[in-house]
Image (cartoon, rainbow, N blue to C red):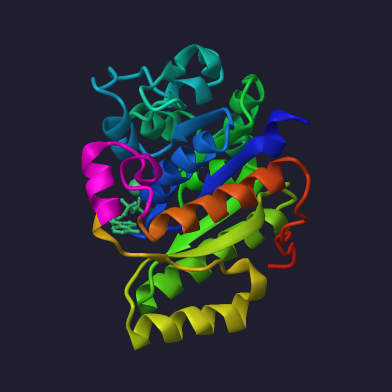
Amino acid sequence: MSTRDAIVAVINRKGGAGKSTTTFQLAGSLVELGRRVLIVDLDPQASLTRLVLDEPVGQGEGIGNCLLLDGPPAASRIRPTALKFDLLPGDRSIEGANIALLDYPGRFRRLRRALAGIAGYDVVLVDTPPSLDFATASAMVAARWAILPTGTVQQDIDALVDTLALLDNLAADDEDVARRLAIVPTGTERDNVDRQVVEALHVTFGDLVLEPIPRTVAVKRSMNARVPVCVSEPRSPAVPRYRALAELVTRAVTGGVAGEVARATA
Ligand SMILES: Nc1ncnc2c1ncn2[C@@H]1O[C@H](COP(=O)(O)OP(=O)(O)O)[C@@H](O)[C@H]1O
Ligand SMILES: [Mg+2]
Protein backbone atom coordinates (compact mmCIF):
# COMPACT_ATOMS: atom_id res chain seq x y z
CA MET A 1 0.00 0.00 0.00
CA SER A 2 1.36 3.43 -0.92
CA THR A 3 1.07 6.47 1.33
CA ARG A 4 -1.35 7.94 -1.17
CA ASP A 5 -3.92 5.21 -0.51
CA ALA A 6 -3.96 6.29 3.15
CA ILE A 7 -4.59 10.00 2.47
CA VAL A 8 -8.09 11.29 3.18
CA ALA A 9 -8.92 14.95 2.47
CA VAL A 10 -11.71 16.62 4.44
CA ILE A 11 -13.08 19.26 2.10
CA ASN A 12 -15.90 21.76 1.66
CA ARG A 13 -15.56 25.33 0.48
CA LYS A 14 -17.86 26.62 3.20
CA GLY A 15 -16.56 27.74 6.57
CA GLY A 16 -18.39 26.15 9.49
CA ALA A 17 -19.31 23.03 7.49
CA GLY A 18 -17.61 20.91 10.14
CA LYS A 19 -14.28 20.08 8.45
CA SER A 20 -11.98 20.69 11.41
CA THR A 21 -14.39 19.18 13.94
CA THR A 22 -14.85 16.07 11.78
CA THR A 23 -11.08 15.75 11.22
CA PHE A 24 -10.39 15.98 14.96
CA GLN A 25 -13.17 13.59 16.02
CA LEU A 26 -12.44 11.14 13.21
CA ALA A 27 -8.77 11.09 14.25
CA GLY A 28 -9.88 10.29 17.82
CA SER A 29 -12.13 7.45 16.64
CA LEU A 30 -9.41 6.04 14.36
CA VAL A 31 -6.95 6.03 17.28
CA GLU A 32 -9.56 4.19 19.34
CA LEU A 33 -9.69 1.55 16.59
CA GLY A 34 -5.92 1.17 16.90
CA ARG A 35 -4.95 3.06 13.76
CA ARG A 36 -1.79 5.17 13.47
CA VAL A 37 -3.02 8.59 12.41
CA LEU A 38 -1.41 11.77 11.11
CA ILE A 39 -3.40 15.00 10.75
CA VAL A 40 -2.14 17.47 8.15
CA ASP A 41 -3.49 20.97 8.83
CA LEU A 42 -3.64 22.65 5.43
CA ASP A 43 -5.59 25.66 6.68
CA PRO A 44 -3.31 28.73 6.95
CA GLN A 45 -5.53 29.89 9.82
CA ALA A 46 -4.29 26.77 11.60
CA SER A 47 -7.32 26.36 13.85
CA LEU A 48 -6.78 22.63 14.26
CA THR A 49 -3.09 23.17 15.00
CA ARG A 50 -3.98 25.63 17.74
CA LEU A 51 -6.51 23.16 19.11
CA VAL A 52 -4.15 20.20 19.21
CA LEU A 53 -0.80 21.69 20.23
CA ASP A 54 -0.16 23.38 23.53
CA GLU A 55 2.22 25.91 22.02
CA PRO A 56 1.72 27.69 18.65
CA VAL A 57 4.15 26.80 15.85
CA GLY A 58 6.54 29.47 14.64
CA GLN A 59 6.16 31.11 11.26
CA GLY A 60 7.39 28.74 8.58
CA GLU A 61 7.47 25.67 10.82
CA GLY A 62 4.35 24.12 9.31
CA ILE A 63 3.53 22.28 6.11
CA GLY A 64 3.59 25.35 3.79
CA ASN A 65 7.34 25.61 3.31
CA CYS A 66 7.50 21.89 2.52
CA LEU A 67 5.55 22.64 -0.67
CA LEU A 68 8.27 24.92 -2.04
CA LEU A 69 10.56 23.51 -4.73
CA ASP A 70 13.55 23.62 -2.39
CA GLY A 71 11.50 23.08 0.77
CA PRO A 72 12.36 20.82 3.72
CA PRO A 73 10.97 17.26 3.88
CA ALA A 74 7.43 17.18 5.30
CA ALA A 75 8.39 14.37 7.69
CA SER A 76 10.76 16.77 9.46
CA ARG A 77 7.81 18.98 10.49
CA ILE A 78 5.67 16.27 12.09
CA ARG A 79 4.99 16.68 15.83
CA PRO A 80 3.59 14.20 18.30
CA THR A 81 0.50 15.32 20.24
CA ALA A 82 -0.91 14.32 23.60
CA LEU A 83 -3.83 12.67 21.75
CA LYS A 84 -2.01 9.62 20.32
CA PHE A 85 -2.10 11.01 16.80
CA ASP A 86 0.61 13.10 15.15
CA LEU A 87 0.25 16.52 13.52
CA LEU A 88 1.83 18.22 10.55
CA PRO A 89 0.97 21.79 11.59
CA GLY A 90 -0.63 24.47 9.50
CA ASP A 91 0.79 27.97 9.31
CA ARG A 92 0.77 31.07 7.12
CA SER A 93 3.55 29.66 4.93
CA ILE A 94 0.78 27.81 3.03
CA GLU A 95 -0.24 31.23 1.66
CA GLY A 96 3.40 32.00 0.88
CA ALA A 97 3.77 28.72 -1.01
CA ASN A 98 0.67 29.52 -3.04
CA ILE A 99 2.21 32.81 -4.18
CA ALA A 100 5.71 31.38 -4.70
CA LEU A 101 4.33 28.61 -6.92
CA LEU A 102 1.88 30.73 -8.96
CA ASP A 103 3.83 30.22 -12.21
CA TYR A 104 4.78 26.62 -11.52
CA PRO A 105 2.73 24.22 -13.66
CA GLY A 106 2.83 21.36 -11.18
CA ARG A 107 1.77 23.48 -8.20
CA PHE A 108 -1.24 21.38 -7.22
CA ARG A 109 0.97 18.28 -7.16
CA ARG A 110 3.45 19.67 -4.61
CA LEU A 111 1.48 18.37 -1.61
CA ARG A 112 1.13 14.88 -3.08
CA ARG A 113 4.87 14.82 -3.56
CA ALA A 114 5.58 16.16 -0.08
CA LEU A 115 3.33 13.57 1.59
CA ALA A 116 4.77 10.69 -0.48
CA GLY A 117 7.89 10.92 1.70
CA ILE A 118 5.93 10.16 4.86
CA ALA A 119 5.65 6.59 6.15
CA GLY A 120 4.35 4.81 9.23
CA TYR A 121 0.69 5.87 9.30
CA ASP A 122 -2.45 3.89 8.55
CA VAL A 123 -4.44 7.07 7.84
CA VAL A 124 -3.36 10.61 6.92
CA LEU A 125 -6.22 13.11 7.38
CA VAL A 126 -5.90 16.46 5.59
CA ASP A 127 -7.98 19.33 7.00
CA THR A 128 -8.51 22.12 4.47
CA PRO A 129 -9.45 25.81 4.49
CA PRO A 130 -12.93 27.10 3.67
CA SER A 131 -12.18 28.04 0.06
CA LEU A 132 -11.58 26.41 -3.30
CA ASP A 133 -8.03 27.62 -3.65
CA PHE A 134 -4.49 26.26 -3.88
CA ALA A 135 -4.69 24.40 -0.57
CA THR A 136 -7.98 22.65 -1.29
CA ALA A 137 -7.01 21.79 -4.88
CA SER A 138 -3.67 20.45 -3.58
CA ALA A 139 -5.50 18.28 -1.04
CA MET A 140 -7.83 16.95 -3.75
CA VAL A 141 -4.82 15.96 -5.87
CA ALA A 142 -2.82 14.56 -2.93
CA ALA A 143 -5.54 12.41 -1.40
CA ARG A 144 -6.94 9.08 -2.55
CA TRP A 145 -10.20 9.80 -0.71
CA ALA A 146 -12.45 12.80 -0.04
CA ILE A 147 -14.85 13.26 2.86
CA LEU A 148 -17.30 16.14 2.57
CA PRO A 149 -18.91 17.34 5.79
CA THR A 150 -21.89 19.57 5.13
CA GLY A 151 -24.45 21.66 6.93
CA THR A 152 -28.10 21.58 5.96
CA VAL A 153 -29.12 25.05 4.73
CA GLN A 154 -29.22 26.00 1.05
CA GLN A 155 -25.82 27.75 1.15
CA ASP A 156 -24.34 24.54 2.50
CA ILE A 157 -25.76 22.52 -0.37
CA ASP A 158 -24.53 25.11 -2.91
CA ALA A 159 -21.05 24.93 -1.38
CA LEU A 160 -21.13 21.12 -1.49
CA VAL A 161 -22.04 21.19 -5.20
CA ASP A 162 -19.25 23.74 -5.92
CA THR A 163 -16.75 21.59 -4.07
CA LEU A 164 -17.71 18.47 -6.03
CA ALA A 165 -17.49 20.51 -9.25
CA LEU A 166 -13.87 21.42 -8.46
CA LEU A 167 -13.09 17.71 -8.06
CA ASP A 168 -14.67 17.05 -11.46
CA ASN A 169 -12.82 19.97 -13.06
CA LEU A 170 -9.47 18.78 -11.74
CA ALA A 171 -10.27 15.29 -13.01
CA ALA A 172 -11.04 16.80 -16.44
CA ASP A 173 -7.58 18.40 -16.36
CA ASP A 174 -6.09 14.90 -16.24
CA GLU A 175 -5.37 14.99 -12.54
CA ASP A 176 -5.73 11.76 -10.62
CA VAL A 177 -7.96 13.25 -7.93
CA ALA A 178 -9.48 11.99 -4.70
CA ARG A 179 -12.41 9.59 -4.94
CA ARG A 180 -15.57 10.56 -3.11
CA LEU A 181 -15.82 8.46 0.01
CA ALA A 182 -18.59 10.13 2.02
CA ILE A 183 -20.83 13.15 2.37
CA VAL A 184 -21.43 13.67 6.09
CA PRO A 185 -24.29 15.92 7.23
CA THR A 186 -22.78 17.49 10.32
CA GLY A 187 -24.21 19.37 13.26
CA THR A 188 -27.77 18.51 12.28
CA GLU A 189 -30.77 19.27 14.48
CA ARG A 190 -33.65 16.87 15.09
CA ASP A 191 -36.17 18.98 13.19
CA ASN A 192 -38.15 18.47 9.99
CA VAL A 193 -36.03 20.88 7.98
CA ASP A 194 -32.81 18.98 8.62
CA ARG A 195 -34.54 15.64 8.07
CA GLN A 196 -35.83 16.80 4.68
CA VAL A 197 -32.46 18.13 3.56
CA VAL A 198 -30.75 14.88 4.54
CA GLU A 199 -33.41 12.98 2.57
CA ALA A 200 -32.83 15.24 -0.44
CA LEU A 201 -29.08 14.60 -0.17
CA HIS A 202 -29.80 10.86 -0.22
CA VAL A 203 -31.90 11.25 -3.37
CA THR A 204 -29.12 13.19 -5.12
CA PHE A 205 -26.01 11.40 -3.84
CA GLY A 206 -27.29 7.97 -2.77
CA ASP A 207 -25.11 5.79 -0.55
CA LEU A 208 -22.40 8.43 -0.44
CA VAL A 209 -24.44 10.21 2.24
CA LEU A 210 -23.81 8.87 5.74
CA GLU A 211 -26.07 9.03 8.76
CA PRO A 212 -25.97 12.63 10.01
CA ILE A 213 -23.76 13.58 12.96
CA PRO A 214 -26.14 15.34 15.35
CA ARG A 215 -25.35 18.70 16.91
CA THR A 216 -24.54 17.84 20.50
CA VAL A 217 -23.22 19.75 23.44
CA ALA A 218 -20.86 16.83 24.08
CA VAL A 219 -19.02 17.60 20.82
CA LYS A 220 -18.79 21.29 21.75
CA ARG A 221 -17.46 20.41 25.19
CA SER A 222 -15.01 17.97 23.67
CA MET A 223 -13.61 20.66 21.32
CA ASN A 224 -13.26 23.07 24.22
CA ALA A 225 -11.56 20.39 26.32
CA ARG A 226 -9.36 19.42 23.32
CA VAL A 227 -10.19 15.75 23.81
CA PRO A 228 -12.10 13.66 21.23
CA VAL A 229 -15.69 12.99 22.28
CA CYS A 230 -15.17 9.21 22.09
CA VAL A 231 -12.79 9.66 25.03
CA SER A 232 -14.47 12.50 26.94
CA GLU A 233 -18.13 11.41 26.59
CA PRO A 234 -18.27 7.95 25.02
CA ARG A 235 -22.05 7.70 25.47
CA SER A 236 -22.78 10.76 23.31
CA PRO A 237 -24.97 9.98 20.27
CA ALA A 238 -22.28 11.54 18.06
CA VAL A 239 -19.75 8.84 19.04
CA PRO A 240 -21.22 5.92 17.02
CA ARG A 241 -21.42 8.21 13.99
CA TYR A 242 -17.76 9.21 14.15
CA ARG A 243 -16.91 5.56 14.76
CA ALA A 244 -18.88 4.49 11.67
CA LEU A 245 -16.94 7.07 9.66
CA ALA A 246 -13.67 5.75 11.13
CA GLU A 247 -14.65 2.20 10.13
CA LEU A 248 -15.48 3.36 6.60
CA VAL A 249 -12.11 5.13 6.35
CA THR A 250 -10.35 2.00 7.63
CA ARG A 251 -12.05 -0.11 4.95
CA ALA A 252 -11.19 2.46 2.28
CA VAL A 253 -7.49 2.72 3.10
CA THR A 254 -7.16 -1.07 3.17
CA GLY A 255 -8.72 -1.41 -0.28
CA GLY A 256 -12.21 -2.49 0.74
CA VAL A 257 -14.19 0.38 -0.83
CA ALA A 258 -14.43 1.39 -4.47
CA GLY A 259 -15.47 4.99 -3.82
CA GLU A 260 -16.97 7.25 -6.45
CA VAL A 261 -14.51 8.41 -9.06
CA ALA A 262 -14.83 12.04 -10.10
CA ARG A 263 -16.38 12.59 -13.50
CA ALA A 264 -13.65 13.67 -15.91
CA THR A 265 -16.20 15.30 -18.20
CA ALA A 266 -16.69 18.74 -16.65
N1 LIG B 1 -21.54 17.45 15.88
C1 LIG B 1 -21.41 18.72 16.33
N2 LIG B 1 -22.03 19.13 17.46
C2 LIG B 1 -21.90 20.41 17.91
N3 LIG B 1 -21.16 21.33 17.30
C3 LIG B 1 -20.51 20.99 16.16
C4 LIG B 1 -20.59 19.67 15.61
N4 LIG B 1 -19.84 19.64 14.48
C5 LIG B 1 -19.33 20.87 14.33
N5 LIG B 1 -19.71 21.69 15.33
C6 LIG B 1 -19.37 23.12 15.53
O1 LIG B 1 -19.57 23.82 14.31
C7 LIG B 1 -18.64 24.88 14.20
C8 LIG B 1 -17.93 24.86 12.87
O2 LIG B 1 -17.22 23.67 12.73
P1 LIG B 1 -15.75 23.59 12.09
O3 LIG B 1 -15.38 22.16 12.21
O4 LIG B 1 -14.83 24.59 12.69
O5 LIG B 1 -16.03 23.96 10.57
P2 LIG B 1 -14.99 24.21 9.37
O6 LIG B 1 -13.69 23.60 9.77
O7 LIG B 1 -15.62 23.52 8.19
O8 LIG B 1 -14.92 25.68 9.17
C9 LIG B 1 -17.67 24.74 15.36
O9 LIG B 1 -18.04 25.66 16.36
C10 LIG B 1 -17.90 23.31 15.83
O10 LIG B 1 -17.63 23.15 17.21
MG1 LIG C 1 -11.76 24.45 9.76
Question: In the image, ligand 1 is in what quadrant?
Answer: bottom left
Magenta span includes 223 = yes
Q: Is residue 115 left or right of residue 46?
A: right
Residue 119 locus on image (x, y percent): 65, 20
Can you say which quadrant of the picture contains the N terminus? top right
User: In terms of image quadrants, where is residue 80?
Assistant: top left
94 versus 176 height, above or below: above
Residue 111 locus on image (x, y percent): 57, 32
The residue closer to the viewer here, 94 or 184, is 184
Q: Is residue 213 left or right of residue 204?
A: left
Q: How many marks?
A: 0
208 versus 36 height, above or below: below
Which residue is painted at 37% across and 60% down in the image?
A: 17
Residue 177 locus on image (x, y percent): 68, 49
The residue closer to the viewer here, 151 or 191, is 191
Which residue is painted at 43% across and 53% down in the image?
A: 239
* The residue stretch that appears in magenta: 218-235
Q: Is residue 45 visible?
A: no
